[in-house]
Every structure is written in structure tokens, then in C-alpha cells.
Amino acid sequence: MNTSVSVLFYIKRSKANIEGICPIYVRVTILTKRFEFSSSKFVNPERWSNEGSKVKGSTEDTRSINNHLENIKSKVLEAEKKLFKKDIILTSENLKNELFGTGERQMTLIPIFKDHNNKIKELVGREYAPGTLERYTTSLKHTVEFLEWKYKISDIEISKIDHAFITEYEFYLRSVRNCANNTAVKYIKNFSKIIKICLANHWIDRNPFANYKSKVKEVERVYLSEGEIQNIINKDFKTERLSLVRDIFLFSCFTGLAYIDVKNLTKSHISIGIDGEKWIFTHRQKTETASKIPILPLTQMIIDKYEDHPECNNQNKLLPILSNQKMNAYLKEIAGVCEIEKELTFHIARHTFATTVTLTNGVPIESVSKMLGHKNLRTTQHYAKVLDKKVSEDMKILRDKFAAMPFNQEKKIN
């Protein structure tokens, strides 16, 4: 390691006392940056050597002061070595923090977590969805409450977060907060992002998640059958409110778009595709991946129905969609009216598109994945279990065909 730190001792005459005795100061320089601090020692200016940067003479008092100054210099250079071992960039601020220990005292969990959330808040609507901020806000709340529950403290130094902390936090989420497996795993995942920030900034030198393992359990995705879709299509709703919600829900069933992506659609998102037909060209807000979806006849009918709706014209929207909360509340009414026993939510429309509308009808999984805007084909494969139903139906036709085929059973083989 080539040292780039210089240490200089000097007397500060401007702070001399009434007897003319001056304090000895330490100046630490790193490239062009420097910081200074008092050595806590004093000397008569006549006894100070500017050239030697030390006290002149050989008295016991002189040797004591000079030894003290040498110890300070050794501590500065040792602090430089520690930064090098920690792979922390050598700056005047980092060296000062290492020397006086101020860096570690300042690096506590909650301010870092709050800073992360504030940055997300500033980018909501541009890079993050409101739901993302809500999840991290809740994660911070759980973290603060865990610190109080487990350690009776309001904050903790990040250097003290270890494997035991992570496992205890998970236990707290599962027991005290009564979180289901996947919910607990997601909160731990949110917390791990804060730890990654600390690692990336070299605020900690070991990863407390190194030996931690958690697994998200596969959740069975609810979707509508063809009969249930047809039932909703055929139902004559007496109120405009339910009719509107039905139409927007069906739009999602036949495009696979999530609520926020439907809400963000404008007429400019519709263009002519490679086949000369109308397509929807958009990007998923959640993952920022492209979604290119051919417009099916029923989808076009819904678009045409609301083309001149005042809200669409005034707010440059493709469809006059309500809030997600209201949509889900009214969908429960629709489920009741249509005698659908499943708990109907808007996101079920996306599942329905992936299964009943596309995969069950023989659309290749690669095409479905592209339309859904999935980054990974494995995500789409979660929906592929529905193909078992398609295989069963196809094989039933084959089974009935071969059931009539004659077979000689006169001789039975033992």
C-alpha cells in the first residue's frame, strides 16, 4: 500500500494563552484535502522546531510530548491501513471517521432506511409505483417495532446486524405480526435491500444474509373459467357503475394488463402491429418491460364503447377506470350477481388472460410471456399448470375414439 497520507504538527499562535504558550495542532493531508485537530499538548513557541515538527530539547517533558505526537501519527497511519483492509475509499472524511470512530456511530439502521424510502417517495410516478412506497413504509414500521420488541431500542448500529438479527426479525414477523410465509419473506427481502445499500457503500464489511435462506411458497393463482367469463359478458347490469367495472375487468381479461397499466393507457398506446392489425404498445409500470398485445374483437368493442366518454377526452385516457379499491369492491358485487364463488379481484383478470384466454387455447407460452411483459419465462410457467386441464380434455377425445376399437382378449396373459 503506497501511503498518500501526510501528518504535520504545528503550533497555533493565534490560540496562545496569556503566558504565550501555544497549543500543538495536527494537520492530516490526503492529496489536496485535509483536516486538523488538537493534540491536547502545549509548548512555548521558543521550544518548538518548525523544521522537525516537534519540541526541541531532551528534557523528560520534551520526550513525553514528542512521544505523544508520534503516537498520534501512528494512529493516523493505522487508520489508513484499516480503510485499505475494509476496501473503503481513502478520503479525508473517511479517514477522520475511522480515526475518531464517528463514522460507525453515525451509521445506524433507521436513518438509512428512512433515506431510502424518501428517495422512493421522490420518484413515485416516474420510477416507482405508489404501492412500492407503501410496502417499504410498512417494512420500516415493522423494523422499528421489532427493535422495540426485541431489544427495547429505537435504532441500532448497522455493524451489529448479524445472522441472529435476521432470524429473530423473521420470527417476529411470523409470530407477533402473524404474517403468512410469503408476506414474511417479502418483508425480509425489503430489509435485505437496505443491507445491500450498506454493503455497496462499504458501511459494513460482512453480509448478515450470507447464510440466510428463505423460500416463497407457490400460491395457486385464481382465474376464471370460460363459462364464468361468458356469464359476466352476458349479464345485463342495471347500474352504469357495475357495467363500467365489468367492461374494464373484461378488457384486462383479454389483454392481460394489470390495473395500473390499464389506468395509464392513452389512445397513443394503440398502433398498427406487424400483422396490420391494431395492437396495444405499452410498458409495465412494475417492471418497465415492454408489453405488445394484439387487440381482440371484444377488447376493441370496449375501447369503442368509451371512446367519447368525457373522462377519456378530458384526461387523455383510453378507458374511464375507477380507483383500484373501488374496482375490487364492485367486482365483489359482480361476483355475487353472477354467482361466481371465487373472491373476484381486478388482478384475477390478468391470471385469466394467462390461463383461460391464452394458454388453454393453445397460445405458446413464449408468446404469452411476451404479452404479459414477464422478464423471465419461469414467471409465466406458474400459469402453465392449467395446461393439465387442456391435456385432459384433448385426451378424453382420444380415449373415446380408442374405446370403440376392438381388442381380442380371449387369451389372458398371466
Image: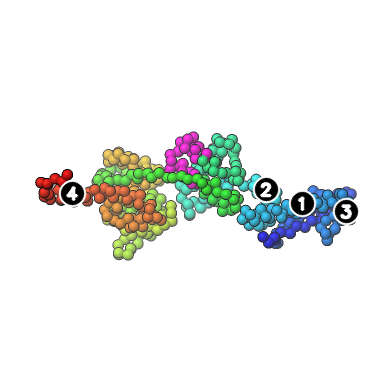
> Which residue in the structure is indicated by mark 2?
102
The amino acid beneath tag 3 is: Ser
Please provide percent x and percent y for residue 411. 11, 46
Label 4 – label 1 distance at C-alpha: 91 Å
The residue drawn where x is 68% and y is 48% is: 101
Q: Residues within 10 Å of mark 2 (few under 14, many from 20)?
A: few
Q: Which numbered circle lies on residue 399?
A: 4
The amino acid beneath tag 1 is: Asn
Label 1 – label 2 distance at C-alpha: 20 Å
Residue 295 lies in quadrant: bottom left
Residue 293 lies in quadrant: bottom left
Please provide percent x and percent y for residue 393. 22, 49
Residues rendered magenta in the picture: 168-190
Callouts 4 and 1 close, C-beta under 8 Å? no
The amino acid beneath tag 2 is: Thr
Label 3 – label 4 distance at C-alpha: 108 Å
- For mark 3, give the secondary structure: loop
- For mark 1, give the secondary structure: helix
> Does the magenta-highlighted stretch encompass residue 68?
no
- Direction from residue 127 to residue 108 in the image, left or right: right
Label 3 – label 1 distance at C-alpha: 18 Å
The amino acid beneath tag 4 is: Arg
Callouts 2 and 4 close, C-beta under 8 Å? no
- For mark 4, give the secondary structure: helix
Q: Quadrant of the C terminus?
A: top left
Label 2 – label 4 distance at C-alpha: 77 Å
> Which residue in the structure is indicated by mark 1?
71
Q: Nearer the viewer, residue 235 or 59?
A: 59
- Direction from residue 295 to residue 42 in the image, left or right: right
Callouts 1 and 2 close, C-beta under 8 Å? no
Label 2 – label 3 distance at C-alpha: 36 Å
Whether residue 247 is visible to the viewer of this picture, yes or no, is no
